[in-house]
Image: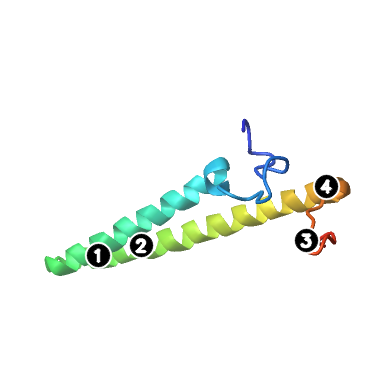
Amino acid sequence: MGDTHHDPTDHSRTTQPRAGITMKDNFFWPGLILLVVALLGLMSTVAAAAYRHYEWLATTVLISVLGVVAGALWIVVERRRVTRIEEQWDASHPESRPVGALGEAKS
């Protein structure tokens, strides 16, 4: 697909233009990595509690919470960026609007 940073939506080859967008658009990856870090922090929290290393609980909980918040925020911001780019493309290409089930153009 080439460089997808400017417009990650596939307008020409599919009826589902956002299918696989998290793999095509590299700007989603930092958010996904932060969510993985949060998951590892949660696993570390459980392990620290299980081994009674209570001095690590605050640190691992903080890593988990910050990872979830930052990862989710990153994904939301990127999703809005993609939606804005898609709306700009739709506005500049009105003849290529998707057709609904009854044949009318979707708005």
Q: Amino acid at mark 4?
A: Ser
Q: Position of residue 60 (x, y in %)?
A: 28, 62
Question: Which is nearer the N-term, disc 2 or disc 3?
Answer: 2
Q: Estimate the spatial distance between the alpha carbons at disc 2 and disc 3, rounded to whole Å.
A: 43 Å
Question: Which is nearer the N-term, disc 2 or disc 1?
Answer: 1
Q: Which residue is mark 2?
A: 64
Q: Which residue is mark 1?
A: 45
Circle number at residue 100: 3
Q: Are marks 2 and 1 in contact (CB under 8 Å)?
A: yes
Observer-nearest residue: 16 or 59?
16
| Label 3 CA crowd tier, 10 Å (few <14, some 14–19, many 20+) | few
Q: Estimate the spatial distance between the alpha carbons at disc 3 and disc 1, rounded to whole Å.
A: 49 Å
| Label 2 CA crowd tier, 10 Å (few <14, some 14–19, many 20+) | many
Q: Nearer the viewer, mark 4 or mark 3?
A: 3
Residue at disc 2, secondary structure: helix
Q: Are marks 4 and 3 in contact (CB under 8 Å)?
A: no
Question: Which is nearer the N-term, disc 4 or disc 2?
Answer: 2
- Please give the name of the residue rendered at 35% of the width and 62% of the height, measured from the top-left corner: 64
Could you tell me if residue 26 is visible in this image?
Answer: no
Question: Which is nearer the N-term, disc 1 or disc 4?
Answer: 1
- Please give the name of the residue rendered at 68% of the width and 50% of the height, measured from the top-left corner: 15
Q: Which residue is mark 4?
A: 96
Q: Estimate the spatial distance between the alpha carbons at disc 2 and disc 1, rounded to whole Å.
A: 8 Å
Q: Up-down: is 97 above or below 64?
A: above
